[in-house]
Image (spheres, grey):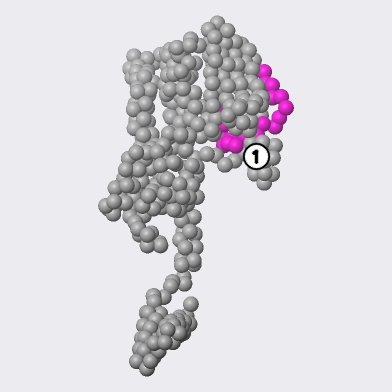
């Protein structure tokens, strides 16, 4: 409303009030010249005061909507989660990264409905009451273990209704895992490499000394040294593979692969080594294709490790199969199973099979070229792919290992490339 319009309305109102007062006085028989002059004076004073108040009314801002649009666009493009709560800790704004991290986060609802960490909630209350910024750590374990640094600062509300708190969550998962990877690599590598290195050093010293001119001993020792060197190479390769997988475990893969094609490739590749050990591999793929969200290289390594374990430690007949099943909680799943008729695994060992360097029989595992990292690689790869690993074994009858992965579905976008068939 313009100042001119407000001023005219003030004069009209004052004149109307004075006129009504004069009419009432005339009807009562008390209208005289002093009363008329007083009414005119009241009209002038009322109109002047009203027009002055209108002139001094504060201008209303006109650029609020564009400024809010810019702020929302900035929040949308921030890769880290950002949350704004008011003085009652109700969610005012949240960018897509925050909603993806906390699915229960909704506008107008308390922050505690989505974020249940007491230390973070107490820090938000402290910032709202004191206005001093705070920094706390946040760890989540579902669906995967992740670590964040939460920076909390006080901000005035846009409508001037009080103080709000801004939460900025910086993802430290990769940095923490990289640090843990370095520590684990040094500890595990130093322990596992000590034996083959000692063997190599011993044979080298023997060849340089007593067996310098012994041709038969030299050939035998060189073969043992070659086996130990290959063992160290496999160990380092598995450690590096496991470290890379753990580093990206919290990042879900974006590609789509045909698990049936990968399984057939691995069965064909493992056929000759299995025959050399006196085993045969039978593959049953059923009604494919079996498309799953995943990384082709990592899933290939998963299938390879399971088949290799069945060949090394299982019996003479190994089966690889693919089926579909409907889980009441998880929906449609693709299940890969690897079975053998070997000696089986005692039940007390099964819960620990996916630990690093855990072996049921250490001597037998090392003699067959095992590093103790195969199932650890399988477990962490499946964690990244939102998959599940189950192991069932009966002593004297054999072992069944099942891998369950989400079914990509028949309505998959045709534009997504099938990494399994890529050259």
Q: Nearer the viewer, residue 85 or 368?
A: 85
Q: Is residue 123 visible?
A: yes
Identify which residue is drawn at 34% across, 50% down. Answer: 152
Q: Nearer the viewer, residue 305 or 25?
A: 25
Residue 380 locus on image (x, y percent): 48, 30
Residue 64 locus on image (x, y percent): 46, 67
Q: Is residue 300 visible?
A: no
Identify which residue is drawn at 34% across, 20% down. Answer: 198
Describe the element under mark 1 as helix, strand or loop. loop
Residue 241 locus on image (x, y percent): 47, 32
* Vertical placement of residue 302 versus 112, above or below: above
Identify which residue is drawn at 67% across, 21% down. Answer: 283
Residue 417 in which image quadrant: top right
Q: Residue furthest top?
A: 396
**Magenta segment:** 281-305
* Vertical placement of residue 52 versus 311, above or below: below
- Quick check: is 223 in the magenta stretch? no
Circle 1: is it few (<14), some (14-19), or many (20+) Cα within 10 Å?
Answer: some
Residue 114 locus on image (x, y percent): 44, 41
Q: Which residue in the protein does label 1 denote?
A: 418
Identify which residue is drawn at 60% across, 16% down. Answer: 339
Q: Is residue 176 left or right of residue 286?
A: left
Q: Is residue 106 left or right of residue 157?
A: right
Q: Quadrant of the C terminus?
A: top right
């Amino acid at each position: 409303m313009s100042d001119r319009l407000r001023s005219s309305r003030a004069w009209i109102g004052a004149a109307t009030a004075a006129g009504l007062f004069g009419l009432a006085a005339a009807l009562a028989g008390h209208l005289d010249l002093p009363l008329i002059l007083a009414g005119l004076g009241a009209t002038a004073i009322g109109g002047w005061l009203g027009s002055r108040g209108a002139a001094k009314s504060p201008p209303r801002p006109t650029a609020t909507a564009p400024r809010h649009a810019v702020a929302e666009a900035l929040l949308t493009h921030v890769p880290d989660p950002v949350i704004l709560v008011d003085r009652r800790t109700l969610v005012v704004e949240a960018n897509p990264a925050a909603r993806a991290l906390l699915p229960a986060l909704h506008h107008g609802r308390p922050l505690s409905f989505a974020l249940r960490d007491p230390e973070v909630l107490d820090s938000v209350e402290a910032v709202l009451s004191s206005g001093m910024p705070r920094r706390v750590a946040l760890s989540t374990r579902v669906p995967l273990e992740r670590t964040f640094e939460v920076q909390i600062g006080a901000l005035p509300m846009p409508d001037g209704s009080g103080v709000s708190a801004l939460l900025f969550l910086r993802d430290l998962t990769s940095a923490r895992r990289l640090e843990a990877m370095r520590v684990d690599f040094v500890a595990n590598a130093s322990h596992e490499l000590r034996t083959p290195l000692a063997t190599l050093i011993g044979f080298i010293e023997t060849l340089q000394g007593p067996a310098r001119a012994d041709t038969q001993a030299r050939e035998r020792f060189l073969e043992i040294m070659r086996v130990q060197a290959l063992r160290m190479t496999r160990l380092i390769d598995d450690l590096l593979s496991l470290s890379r997988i753990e580093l990206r475990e919290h990042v879900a893969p974006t590609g789509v692969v045909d698990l049936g094609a990968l399984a057939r490739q691995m069965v064909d590749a493992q056929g000759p080594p299995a025959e050399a050990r006196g085993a045969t591999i039978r593959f049953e793929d059923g009604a494919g294709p079996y498309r799953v969200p995943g990384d082709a290289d990592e899933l290939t390594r998963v299938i390879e490790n399971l088949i290799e374990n069945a060949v090394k430690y299982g019996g003479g007949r190994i089966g690889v199969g693919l089926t579909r099943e409907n889980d009441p909680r998880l929906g449609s799943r693709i299940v890969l199973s690897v079975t053998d008729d070997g000696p089986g695994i005692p039940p007390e060992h099964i819960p620990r099979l996916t630990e690093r360097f855990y072996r049921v029989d250490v001597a037998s595992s090392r003699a067959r070229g095992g590093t103790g990292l195969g199932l650890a690689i399988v477990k962490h790869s499946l964690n990244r792919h939102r998959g599940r690993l189950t192991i069932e074994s009966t002593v004297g009858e054999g072992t069944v290992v099942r891998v369950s992965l989400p079914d990509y579905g028949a309505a998959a976008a045709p534009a997504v490339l099938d990494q399994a068939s890529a050259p």
